[in-house]
Amino acid sequence: MPGALSAPLGVGVGLGVGVVRIVVDRDLCQGHAACEGEAPEVFAVSKKGELTLLQPEPPETERAVVELAVKYCPTHALSIEED
């Protein structure tokens, strides 16, 4: 279609892809950095053990590594919410 805008890869209507958000339970997080090891583009842990979400709503291309970060969090402080 002339004048139609195309969505970025992995984003769009009809793809069955919703927004994925990472949820951190700060009371459970102990800064082990397993998440950073699995998905360094999404998570950063300081030397003091403070977690920073670099991408709170990561793109679909990061989904597999985010799921591994959630799975391997030793304190189960991470979860994924989908819209």
Image (cartoon, rainbow, N blue to C red):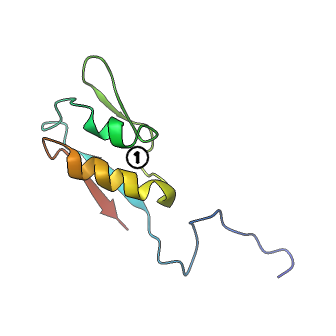
Residue at 22 percent of width and 52 percent of height: 71
As drawn, the residue found furthest toward the top would be 47
Residue 65 in percent (x, y) is at 38, 51
Residue 15 in percent (x, y) is at 53, 77
Residue at 30 percent of width and 60 percent of height: 81
Instruction: Decide if residue 47 is on the left or right side of residue 53.
Output: left
Residue 41 in percent (x, y) is at 46, 40
**Residue type at mark 1?**
Pro
Q: Secondary structure at mark 1?
A: loop
Residue at 58 percent of width and 72 percent of height: 12
As drawn, the residue found furthest toward the right would be 2
Instruction: Decide if residue 42 is on the left or right side of residue 67.
Output: right
Q: Classify 10 Å Cα crowding around label 1: few (below 14), some (14-19), many (20 and above).
A: some
Residue 36 in percent (x, y) is at 34, 36
Residue at 43 percent of width and 52 percent of height: 57
Q: Which residue is mark 1?
A: 56
Q: From the image, which quarter does the N terminus lie in?
A: bottom right
Note whether 30 is above or below 14 in the view shown: above
